[in-house]
Image (cartoon, coloured by chain):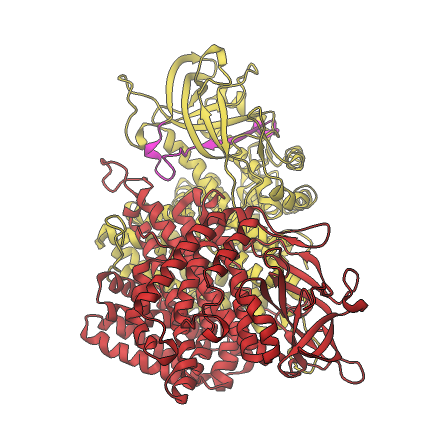
Chain colours: A yellow, B red
Amino acid sequence: MTDTLLPADLVDFLLFDWLELESLLSRPRFADHDRESVSALLGLADRIAREEFLPHYKTADQVEPRLTAEGDVEVLPQAGEALRAYAEAGFMAAPFATGHGGLGLPELVHMAATGSFFAANVTTAGYAMLTVGNARLLVHNASPAQIEAFVPKQLDGSAFGTMCLSEPQAGSSLADVRTRAVAEGQDELGARYRLTGNKMWISGGDQNISATIHHLVLAKIPDADGTLPEGTRGLSLFLVPKHLPGGERNDIAVAGLNHKMGYRGTSNCLLNFGEGTRFRPGGQAGAVGWLVGKPGQGLAIMFHMMNEARLGVGMGAASIAMRAQALSVEYARTRLQGRIDPAGAPVAIAAHADVARMLTRQRAIAEAALSIILFCARLVDDRDTAETPEARARADRLLGLLTPAAKTWTSEWGLEVNSIAIQIHGGYGYTRDFDVEQLYRDQRLNPIHEGTTGIQGLDFVGRKLLKEGGAGLEMLAERVARTLERAKGQGLAGEGQALSAAWDKFLAVREALPMLPRAHWMGVATEVLDGFGTTLAAWMLLDQALVAGSDERRILAQFFIASELPRAHRGFDLALGNPVPLLDFTGDAP
Amino acid sequence: MTDTLLPADLVDFLLFDWLELESLLSRPRFADHDRESVSALLGLADRIAREEFLPHYKTADQVEPRLTAEGDVEVLPQAGEALRAYAEAGFMAAPFATGHGGLGLPELVHMAATGSFFAANVTTAGYAMLTVGNARLLVHNASPAQIEAFVPKQLDGSAFGTMCLSEPQAGSSLADVRTRAVAEGQDELGARYRLTGNKMWISGGDQNISATIHHLVLAKIPDADGTLPEGTRGLSLFLVPKHLPGGERNDIAVAGLNHKMGYRGTSNCLLNFGEGTRFRPGGQAGAVGWLVGKPGQGLAIMFHMMNEARLGVGMGAASIAMRAQALSVEYARTRLQGRIDPAGAPVAIAAHADVARMLTRQRAIAEAALSIILFCARLVDDRDTAETPEARARADRLLGLLTPAAKTWTSEWGLEVNSIAIQIHGGYGYTRDFDVEQLYRDQRLNPIHEGTTGIQGLDFVGRKLLKEGGAGLEMLAERVARTLERAKGQGLAGEGQALSAAWDKFLAVREALPMLPRAHWMGVATEVLDGFGTTLAAWMLLDQALVAGSDERRILAQFFIASELPRAHRGFDLALGNPVPLLDFTGDAP
């Protein structure tokens, strides 16, 4: 049994042996860090996660955020305490440069630390992740005055951040955003606007933890004739704080809270901007906001945060799966049931072949999910700090290619790990007395938020493979080829062949895509993405087996390649085969 | 849009065209029924399900059964009203012979009617299904005096039934049951016993709907030296009523209620028999019960009810999936989001290829699940009423072979249908405002109760294929061969070939099984069962396409065979290949 939320030896292996963190730390940007300081920091993250986040995991599910009669959202006090401990220990600032008061931590280390908080309590940790992502966007895109006014408060935890994209009529389709931003001149924070509109699904949209909240809001600036520009190119980004710099409340009202299956600790709000019924800053209706970046850049800027959030969702999915796996092992080792020898005593259920299969499968999938995200985090660091511009651009391309899989494969297959955890616990796992029940409900959100699985499939096939021609793939292909070469010499030739067959079929799909009718590739995009994610996971587990040389990692690779990799062919075959007929549900219902 | 809970035209097709119900109705046993009376009865079931069961579906989830200070269980009053309407309309008695006051309905029709209630509100309907199953067991196994004393009350709804098998230490392993039954002589109801022990996971274990409850309890009669016999052969079955015939309360106490993820409307109890703290019938401790059948026959008798309950779980799973599919179609046809033509207006999401794929996939899986259960219900009728003893025995064998798949494939893939329903609804589907959220949580129970998926896998491979040599398969093989032959002539030759390949590989698995090491087949049993279920579903959809000749059924068969059938090969390949290594979680934890 490991004592840490994410097994320390596994994280150690992935970071230092597989992803060569020490080589990363040798770069000038990370001169303040070494193996020892990283381990200490990960240990601290685990301790705070266990002491402050884990204890209220179940309570945060039972005592949901509530809307008071005054229209404010109250959340569980323990969540606030945990997040204050988090900020005080410096985790909110950790990934930022020392110039911003941070530790300048590599994203790889920051992501690994984040995993402990996600594993302990994903909904409380969610507030922190949104705040960090929001602050990062500002650091990269806001003006110096805006950065100075807003970012330090976020890094010390006195302001939390949100991202306000969706609207009731515009979930996945941001072109239909109708929130309106009308210019109101310039002030010391830049171009000032008044916003009116309704934003839906806003995580952390209101709460009573932080003194204030910084909303990043996508809105459209009307043309001269008052109409809103069509499409996504008309979208601009605004920083709209809950409180104006002078302390006055901004015109933002919580119109409602969503009551979710899981993920309940994170408040999820319908926000009305500029209704003027409750607050009228300066005596006028319209929420005050400042333009971030230039007009029309909204979506481009937001994409950065969205991509980061997608990796965050993937890390949440991997971490929730990892915790469920650990709980399953613990249960299966202690629950006595059934016999191997009919005349003998009952055995721990871990001794039954079917349970051992489920446990092995859980571990292989969960660790592959974790690996995909940490691999991507390493690419973030390479994108930002690699020695040459070419190397940075290459990392950026591969990161873009992998992000849809990093978000989706972890979410979809993480859910399977969580479902298996319930299955291993039997009837007990279906009761609310056991955390695996809640972990499953929490996990079910991940294929939905920050771009559904369907959206990710279209992004992967339509944008990354077709429009961008699979840019980034060459770097991955090199790595895969190296792994296949090494596998031959280390008794994993059969596994290498199986991986090679799946990889080649994926490449064949990529070749075929430009010739496929649009309706065909759009209909199989999620299946192709799933196949790609499975192939990627197989490669990583095989590569790790070669790096580690341990029985455990060898078994995980062998198991995954025999049991899971065959699924990848199905998705690729659907793309390569004749279009499969679909029912038409748009006319008279079939 | 169909108005009925299960599409009336689909049920009509499956019953009359595919399963040839009219030929069944021509048998003497069913002389009272014809096509018209069957349709009227199904219409009545749908009406009562919609009017009495559906309206409190969500409320039954929100207002869980509760344990009063007096130790009794209170459930939602609407559930009681619905069940009284159900009993008054004759549905509790419907499947029983007219001699018992029933309609002598074919099981095929009874099952189809049951589907409407499951689709409307599976947890309220659950009380009825348990009661019918319990009464059926009594009719087949109890003494005339017992039948007269207990069954009529169940058929008029004044007594509900339960099955009390599991104990805290004996979930899947009934050999470890420790409830003790001590003889107390004979009375007018037969051999009378006093029972002491704790029963866990008892659905409907207590409620305040029916005037009393008839528990069927598995217990062991101690040997002369007071020790309990080992293994399952020592198990006997007892009828233990909540109230004794004179009205006195029996010594049964509710020790607790389980709080579940879903399926909340059905109370789920920990029952203590014979504690003597609250009730002492006749002034003595020990719950009074009467032996049903002979000592040591408990498990054999119970198997009958368990197998019936397994089909019931499958029907619940199929029905929940069918309802989620209908809700998904409705939502996808009305929710506007995104565009096909970038310059055009937003379209209903059903127009997007990925959504159409999800909807088609849902429908193919859900209708295949429904088909499997109705096919099995037809086999029940053949087992009971076929013209020759050989035909009855053949149906019985095939029913035994199919039952694990009927329970498991529907549950596991029904859950996928429900998960897709959430995905189609996007963020809305994850909120408790939409029924698809609850349907998903309800469905998650089905792979667990009445024998987990792992137990079904072992039953299928270990008992049905290995021990019984795949008895029943020859009848299925004939049907499959006939379908394959017909497919050639009707433009579905490619689909026939794909089915043939999967079927042949399944037969190869069956051939290979006796040579496989025990640990190997035990480790892949659930994968083999899943592959078999998928192959079975593919056959049924193909067979239906040939029978119907409609575009819709043709598309469903083509889609399922292209998209889902490839999964079957994976399970079979795992069995036919080298054993896949598993981690050992029993020693020092890996």
Magenta residues, start to end: A154-178
Looking at the rendering, which quadrant does residue A582 occupy? bottom left
- On the picture, is B231 further left or further right than B413? right
**Which residue is pictured at 64% across the width and 45% down the height?**
A57
Q: Does residue B582 show up?
A: no
**Residue nearest the viewer, comparing B437 with B310:** B310
Up the image or down, B13 lies above or below B301; here it is above
Toward the top, the furthest residue is A283
Find residue A412 and report its horizontal and vertical position in percent.
Answer: 46, 54
Find residue B68 and report its horizontal and vertical position in percent.
Answer: 69, 50
Looking at the rendering, which quadrant does residue B105 occupy? bottom left
In the rendered image, residue B578 lying in the magenta stretch gets the answer: no
**Which residue is pictured at 32% across the width and 42% down the height?**
B334
**Which residue is pictured at 34% across the width and 26% down the height?**
A296
**Residue nearest the viewer, comparing B590 with A376:** B590
Find residue A278 and report its horizontal and vertical position in percent.
Answer: 51, 18
- On the picture, is B465 further left or further right than B290? left
- On the picture, is A520 further left or further right than A203? left
Looking at the rendering, which quadrant does residue B230 occupy? bottom right
**Residue nearest the viewer, comparing B582 with B430:** B430
Up the image or down, A141 lies above or below A304; here it is above
Find residue B354 and report its horizontal and vertical position in percent.
Answer: 32, 51
Q: Does residue A77 show up?
A: yes
